[in-house]
Image (spheres, coloured by chain):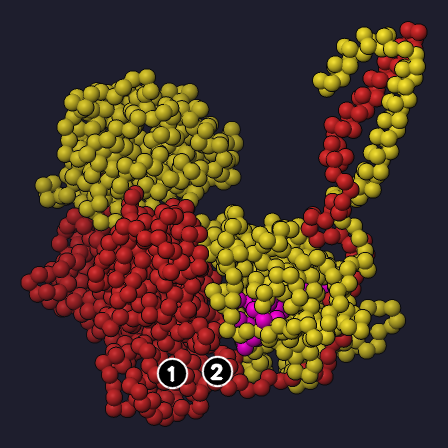
Chain colours: A yellow, B red
Amino acid sequence: MCASVKYNIRGPALIPRMKTKHRFYYVTLFSIVLLGLIATGVFQFWPHSIESSGDGGVEKRSIREVPVVRLPAASPIPERGDLSCRMHTCFDVYRCGFNPKNKIKVYIYPLKKYVDDAGVPVSSTISREYNELLAAISDSDYYTDDISRACLFVPSIDVLNQSPLRIKETAQALAQLSRWDRGTNHLLFNMLPGGPPDYNTALDVPRDRALLAGGGFSTWTYRQGYDVSIPVFSPLSAEVALPEKAPGPRRYFLLSSQMAIHPEYREDLEALQAKHRESVLVLDKCTNLSEGVLSVRKRCHQHQVFDYPQVLQEATFCVVLRGARLGQAVLSDVLQAGCVPVVIADSYILPFSEVLDWKRASVVVPEEKMSDMYSILQNIPQRQIEEMQRQARWFWEAYFQSIKAIALATLQIINDRIYPYAAISYEEWNDPPAVKWTSVSNPLFLPLIPPQSQGFTAIVLTYDRVESLFRVITEVSKVPSLSKLLVVWNNQNKNPPEESLWPKIRVPLKVVRTAENKLSNRFFPYDEIETEAVLAIDDDIIMLTSDELQFGYEVWREFPDRLVGYPGRLHLWDHEMNKWKYESEWTNEVSMVLTGAAFYHKYFNYLYTYKMPGDIKNWVDAHMNCEDIAMNFLVANVTGKAVIKVTPRKKFKCPECTAIDGLSLDQTHMVERSECINKFASVFGTMPLKVVEHRADPVLYKDDFPEKLKSFPNIGSL
Amino acid sequence: MPLWRTKSFWLALSVSWLLLILLGVFPLRLAVPPGPPPGRSRGWPHWLDAAFLQSFSQSETLPEDATQLPRAPQGSSCTWGACFDTSKCKGNVLKIFAHSPAGTTTEAHRRILDSLEGSRYYALSPAEACLHLFLPSQDQTCGPLPPHWNGGRNHLVLSLYPAPCTRLGQAMVAEATPSLDIFRPGFDIALPYLPEAHPLQGGAPGQLQQHSPRPGATLLAVAEEKGRWRTTDTHASTCPWGKHCEQDPGPHQTHPGETLPNATFCLIPGHRSAASCFLQALQAGCIPVLLSPRWELPFSEVIDWTKAVIIADERLPLQVLAALRDMLPSKILSLRQQTQFLWTTYFSSVEKVIHTTLEIVQDRIWGTSAHSSLMWNSPPGALLALPSFSTSLKDFPFYHLQQGSSPESSFSALIWVGVSGEPLLKLIQVVAGSRYCAQILILWSSEKPPPDRWPETTVPLTVIEGRRKASDRFFPYSDISTNAILSLDAHSSLSTSEVDFAFVVWQSFPERMVGFLTRNHFWDEASGAWSCSAEVANEFSMVLTTAAFYHRYYHTLFTYSLPKALRTMADDTPTCVDILMNFLVATVTKLPPIKVPYGRQLREAVPLAAEGPGPTPELQPLAQDCFSRVAAGFGHMPLVASRVRLDPVLFKDPVSVQRKKYRSLEKP
């Protein structure tokens, strides 16, 4: 830009001085330079511009062009898999040391074609699924192209299916990988292990210490906590879209759709069908199909032809029986159809069983008990069946649906082992989204009544009402269980009074000066708060008696996960305006307590300061209002519980005020508070506040009993 | 000439522009010679011929004749399906028979057998039993195998302390901290390493006093040899364990003996001998950080340990320390609480450990009707949540929050008619007057025949003939159609608004009992036993079930989970059922019951409980005796005192009666 400006200025001045010959030179020179540049530019960018228009700069080559590697017959073969391997013995965790964000880095070896001495290929280069799998890893956050920073290595040698492999040569190919090192930190994916006649349940290729993500492990080959059990991918799921079907009773109670079943098992199944007739359907291969019909997509019962996998949606339970291999692709089809799998394969390690709770989605029947299967299934209540149907479909959607889903779940499992403190929880793995939305996990779930001796910390938020503040301090200091008093001085323009002027009280008094006059300062988790119980109190709440405060603390001890406060309020649905309304009248119900005088757990300070959803915190600070309503929303949302209003007290400020309190009567104030409720409800996406009709009083409150024998006699005035 | 000049000027200008654009926008392209294709570093290539690739399973022809039936596995390769015969395990109860090596019954064995006798699992003869329990001797001679051994089939070899001979035949093995190499997941059961002096029953509760750690609390304690602990800080420069660091481990204190420092995390090395520190840390609420444990965690089949402990790799000390330092307060909070829950629920006594073991075996037998993971891993725990009650978690009183459900809005009144068979007209009218009442059940336990005619009510009324036993009161009758039960006595005198208000309160606390009349418990120094009193006091810990709301589930729990001895005691001493029910609910909730206002409390308290199965106000010696026996039977004192009564929001406030919803509650 600058250069052109220069020319712009100088150009006209320079050119007139040039001779014609020079001009000609210049023109020619410029033209040549121009042409050269255009030519270079075109040659430079031509091929790329086409490529990048296609797929964002990724190399486009043919698989036939991959480099060929010749494996000498004598090249080394890895040891057979070591059955005693565990993460802390066979896995080199140091390589995962420098991965930021608790995420492992995965390297994929470039694709090569392996041939033996005679030039005969070791296997077909790569299958469609393995190509998809590697592409999925490559597109994920786990991928790195820097081999020296990788924690996990994935060979591009395809061992998904063992049958077409030449075992010895494949092993040799693995052994010559550049970072093989006895297979340490290498991950192999295999879905169809073993070969005739006895079909091992794990990949037969010698692989030394490599991790195996295998479909069809048995308890004898599966190295718990080291290998990963994965599903056998069903290619049908990519071809056929089965829309989700609502759970409920279906036409057939039990269905068997597999074609290759041991004759003895087929006899058992047919006996069941003979006994229960209409409710059991046992399908087999079709023998009389016309030309051109895909036999994989059809199943037959006698002469009746059914579409597969659609027929699975007609059944409540679907049999998944072991074949030659333990892992069966039919499991995936069955889950997709929302049919509850009945797994009959002794010692089979179900896919992702390390993290998935299969009890919620399947029924496992021992092979010996196959004939009792029907009665076992009939004992399951309908509600539980529907739950399982829903769960089965969710498992398919989340972890079976595509090769990508399988690959990412596998890497997540390995990642969770390496960074256990950042691992995904049981609920995140297993709860369907609908459950995740409605369920509440109370952060203070342990029923624990804290000891009285701990006491509470009173936090007084103040700006400049020193006289009133001192009265509050004096009053609060009379409460036996007070252990510390914290004054949050929210006025930046004025210094707090001299130390000597403060009331002398029996507990430590600390003044915290804030940087900005923000309402949220009262909810900051100050390190000075050493107790779990916090009493938030405004600097003008002078009417609470010592008995009332002490009793409030006792109530909090019994309900430490709730807001326990004195001024009760209510939210109401305004049918005319179609929105929420704030109510401060003396009603029969309570859904909020104001934090002008309330006990709560210190943890909620942390939540308010760091975990408040949306922009609520800023909104409160900007409007200088509704911090108490925000706290009520937050606590109710996270615990799912209602507040507790303590004692009949309804007036808190000056005794001579006849009204509830000056501010609250103000009409604009009420409108603004209603506005807050509507705003917060929309941010939370729901109305978390719970309405209750009770308040907490001492056991003998207003009972006909000598006042002097009551623990908290000075309670009862409004 | 000017034309020429202008032309050349424009040419120069355009050339310079072009130059600028080309040089400015693609300077690198020009500078770097065309080397390797730039797509190389962008991950897995998109093959041109990817569409022509074959599926991995396409070449697979299904091997139809190759299916083999499984071979019968032997010993070390046993699995649940192959080595356990469930055909003998019928019904809702796991029947077990315990063999012990003849002659050499050790103290430990006797304690185990004692805890089983009278529990809900016991079978009288070995022929009836579904599971045979075998306690191997701890000396070097392996001793003879018990009769009915049958190759170890359906046997559980249970060894709380390390014993030489455990792996026998097809038997399952339950042993303390088994090594990962020999543990058979889904078949064997891992037990905790219990100290010698572990209490048989009850046991000490968790030591955690606070949900969240105090600010500035010590972060880390490290388990050392001989049960010592050492506190340390987590600065990256110091190195808390192992040989991986050469620097000085930094300032530390050594705590001798068994005292566990008050730290947030407890590092426990991975070798088996350190496993004894594990329970210690769990009880103290110090989050165990296990460094590559070589042993299976106790009850790992059902307990989700990731919710209570951190399992880390011992080879990454600095990373683990950094992770502990940066752990979110919310995570620390939940881990701490879970340690306490697990300790009190499954580990605090020998009895709990044994029952948990049996419950796991039972879950395997039950299959689909077993405890769900939520039941095992959230309060009150699987020993107190019976899946035979319902397979839907929404039916239980404890899981409403996790399930996002709320309790039903109606209740069943269950009126117990005792010996004299008094008229019930007034009581039935009061209860039926409640808008929440769904049905009335009369439990007729009198010698007199029930009357033929009952008052006309708007809700269905059913009469159940009791077996004239006191424990009948809490039998899970199938006629009860709602989850909320209002338990009443023929003598109870309530008003409809009292019933309404109490039920609305119960909906907020469905796992607790909500009652009108209360009792206290206290430690009687003079007699050195727990005692109870009916005096009017500022606190209470029990409510009388002669008028109380509670969840239907407690009937199931009362009938099927209480030890037989306690149930028969209740039948012998009818005043006991009330106490027993309160103990049971308190064991489950670990919280006090709820009291709501009762208008006639002082005036009518005496006649109310004069004849009913509750303790009378001037507690007879019988009731006192019963109380201390129940307390002994439970092995600990579950009752918790409360100083709170829940009243209607405007209760007895000096405001217009017209404003109040529960007006009649305030009439004298």
Which residue appears at 91% of the width and 22% of the height? Answer: A28
Q: Earlier in the sequence, mark 1 or mark 2?
A: 2
Q: Is residue A538 left or right of residue A172?
A: left
Image coords of residue A341 (percent x, y): 61, 69
- At label 1, counting other C-alpha atoms closer than 10 Å, the crowd grade (few under 14, some 14-19, many 20 or more) is many
Residue B76 image label: 2
The answer to which image quadrant residue B575 occupies is: bottom left
Q: Is residue A230 magenta?
A: yes
The answer to which image quadrant residue A165 occupies is: bottom right
* Residue range (magenta): A207-235
Image coords of residue A391 (percent x, y): 57, 60
Which residue appears at 40% of the width and 58% of the height? Answer: B244
Query: Is residue B85 shown above or below A510?
Result: below
Q: Is residue A280 visible?
A: no
Judging depth in this view, the residue of B665 and A563 nearest the camera is A563
Query: Is residue A708 shown above or below A123?
Result: above
Q: Is residue A700 visible?
A: yes
> What residue occupies the far left of the structure in this picture?
B526
| Residue to which mark 1 is pinned | B166
Q: Is residue A510 left or right of residue A90?
A: left
Image coords of residue B264 (percent x, y): 32, 52
Which residue appears at 65% of the width and 54% of the height? Answer: A137
Amino acid tagged 2: Ser
Judging depth in this view, the residue of A706 and A230 nearest the camera is A230
**C-alpha gap between disc 1 and disc 2:** 12 Å
The answer to which image quadrant residue B340 occupies is: bottom left
- At label 2, counting other C-alpha atoms closer than 10 Å, the crowd grade (few under 14, some 14-19, many 20 or more) is some
Image coords of residue A468 (percent x, y): 23, 22
Q: Is residue A373 magenta?
A: no
Judging depth in this view, the residue of A696 and A309 nearest the camera is A309
